[in-house]
Image: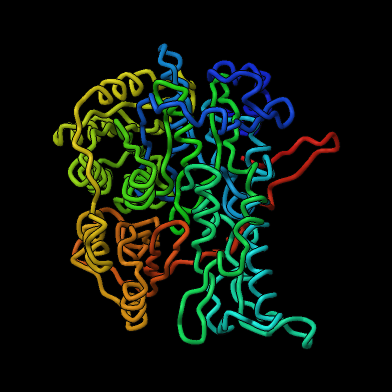
Amino acid sequence: MAEFKSDIQIAQEAEMLPILEVARRAGLTEDMIEPYGRTKAKVDIHSLADRPLRGKLVLVTAINPTPAGEGKTTTSIGLADALNLTGRRTMLALREPSLGPVFGIKGGAAGGGYAQVVPMEDINLHFTGDFHAIGAANNLCAAMLDNHIKQGNALGIDPRRVVWRRCVDMNDRQLRNVVDGLGGVADGTPRQDGFDITVASEVMAVFCLATDLMDLKARLARMVIAYTYDRRPVTVADIHAEGAMAALLKDAIKPNLVQTLEGNPAFVHGGPFANIAHGCNSVEATTTALKLADYVVTEAGFGADLGAEKFLDIKCRYAGIRPSAVVLVATVRALKYNGGVAKSDLGAENLEALEAGMPNLLQHVSNIRDVWGLPVVVAINAFPTDTAAELALVERKCNELGVYVALSEVWAKGGEGGRALADEVVRLCDEPSDFRFAYELDDTIEGKLAAIATKVYHADGVDFTSSAAKQLRQLEEQGFGGLPICVAKTQYSFSDDQAKLGAPRGFRITVRNLKVSAGAGFIVALTGDIMTMPGLPKVPAAEKIDVTPDGRIVGLF
C-alpha cells in the first residue's frame, strides 16, 4: 500500500512566500497590511472602505457530513488554486478553526493533502488571537452583567433570567452547567450559569456578520443578555458594555491574510459552528475579497441544509451579496455510507449502496437550484478506492437532473487537479440566475420555520414543545418576529435525528427552544439533541498531538 504524507508533513515542507508578496498578489500595498510575523497579516479594512464589490462569489457547500469525510475546505482551496492557475484572479475566504474541535475531533479546517492553507499549525492553534478577543469580549459582558446585579441591580435584572453565558475556546462538557457566585456577599450573587464553546457564542455571530467596526459596536449593543423581574429584555447597551467590547475586537475584525500551498492569497477569518453562530467566514473577509479579486471562493459549514441555508438566508440578506455559482461537494465513500455501508467497508465497490445513498446528494442539488435559484456543479472529491463504475453512476444520476459533475483531484494534485471544476464554475458564473430566499422576513416565526423545514429538509412540518410555543409568542410580542431564523439541528441528517441518513421522508421537525440573538440579527431555533458545548469524544484528537524537542508540532492532521 502506498505511503501518503500527512497533512501536517505536507504543510511543514511547504516554502511559504513572505506575507508582503502574498499581499501584493492580492492587490494590497504595504501600508494596507499589519504583519503578524512573516507569514500572516491583518488587512486594514478602513483603507478599502470605499472600494466597490467587483468579484463573482462562488459558494462551496456539501452533502450532509459523514464519518467518511466530504472535503469542503480541501475542495475550496484547490478550486481557488485552480482558478488562479488558469489565469483568473481569485481569492479564498475560509472560516477559522477553533481549539475545541481541534483537540476534540480533528485538526481543524485548513484543508488537506496538496490543497491547504498555511501556516497550518498557526491557523489550527492560536493564529492571530481572534478567538481570544471574542472570548474576552463575551466574558467582559458577563462580568459587567453580574457586577451590575451585585452593585444594586438598578435595572431590576432577575438572576433567574440571565440568558448570557460565559464562553471558553475548549470543548469541555464539564462547563455546560455550573453554579457560580458562591462564597458570600463579597463574591457576587449565586446563580445557575454555564459556558458555551467560543465559536457558538453570539459574539462570534456578531463578529461574522458585522459590515464594519461601527456596525459591530451597534450589533453588540443590541444583544439581549437578561430579563427583568417584569420580563423586559436587558441589552448590552443597558449595562454600557458595547464600547469596551468593541475595543477588544477592533483588531480582530480585520481579516487575516495567509496563503495556499501554491502561494495564492486567502482570508481565514471568523466562523465555525454552523449550528448556532453562523457557519461561514466573516462578512468583512468576504466583502474585502470581493473588492480585490475577480472570483472569490468561500465555504459554508456542515451540509447545505445548515451552512448554505444560513449563508444564503442570513449572510447574503444582511451583507447584500449573492453567489454566482454553488459547488456541492460529495465523495463516493460518503454516498455509500448514506446507502448503509459501514465505514470499514467503504473501500469496496458497491453500486447498490451508492445508488441508495444518492438521494442525499440529489436533494441538496435540487434545493440549491429550485429553492434558492442558483446554478450548481457537483464536485466529487476523488479517493483512490473510487471505481470507474461508481463515478459513472454519480455522473449519470446528476446529469439526469441537468447538473454537471467534475472529478476533483485537488487533494493529490493541488490546483492542477481542479482545472475541470474551475472551468465549469466560470461557465456557471456567466449564466443568468434567479436568486431568492427560502422565506420572506415579513412571514411569522412559525411560517419561516415551516418554510425551512418543508422546502429545505423536506419534512412534513414543524412541531413546538409547550415551552418553545410560549417563547415564540414572547419573541413576537417583544418585536423580534421580523428576524431571520438560524436553525440549530444535527448536521448529519436532513431531519433532526442524526440516524436518518439519505433523504428521509415522513418526519417532522421538533423545535424545543427559541431564543433571540438580537445583535447577530436572528432567532435561534434549537431542534433535536444539540449542544453548544459538545464535549470530547472517547479518543480525543489531542491524544495524538505532540511537540518535538526542536518545537515542531506533530499529530495535528
Q: What residue sits 57% from the left and 45% below the top? A: 97
Along the line of sight, which residue is nearer the eye, 102 or 315?
315
Name the residue: 31% across, 78% down: 473
Quadrant location, the C terminus: top right
Residue 307: x and y in percent read 39, 49
User: What is the quadrant of residue 459 in the picture?
Assistant: bottom left
Between 19 and 2, the one nearer to me in the picture: 19
Q: Quadrant of residue 258?
A: top right
Task: Work out whether 207 lies above or below 23.
Answer: below
Q: Position of residue 506 (x, y in %)?
A: 19, 66
Q: Is residue 489 visible?
A: no
The colour scheme used to paint the residues is rainbow
Q: Position of residue 231 (x, y in %)?
A: 45, 82
Does the image show residue 511? yes
150 lies above or below 29: below
Q: Is residue 205 left or right of residue 185?
A: left
Q: Nearer the viewer, residue 11 or 422?
A: 422
Compared to 225, does 41 lie above or below? Answer: above
- Determine whether, in the image, residue 15 is placed left or right of residue 54: right
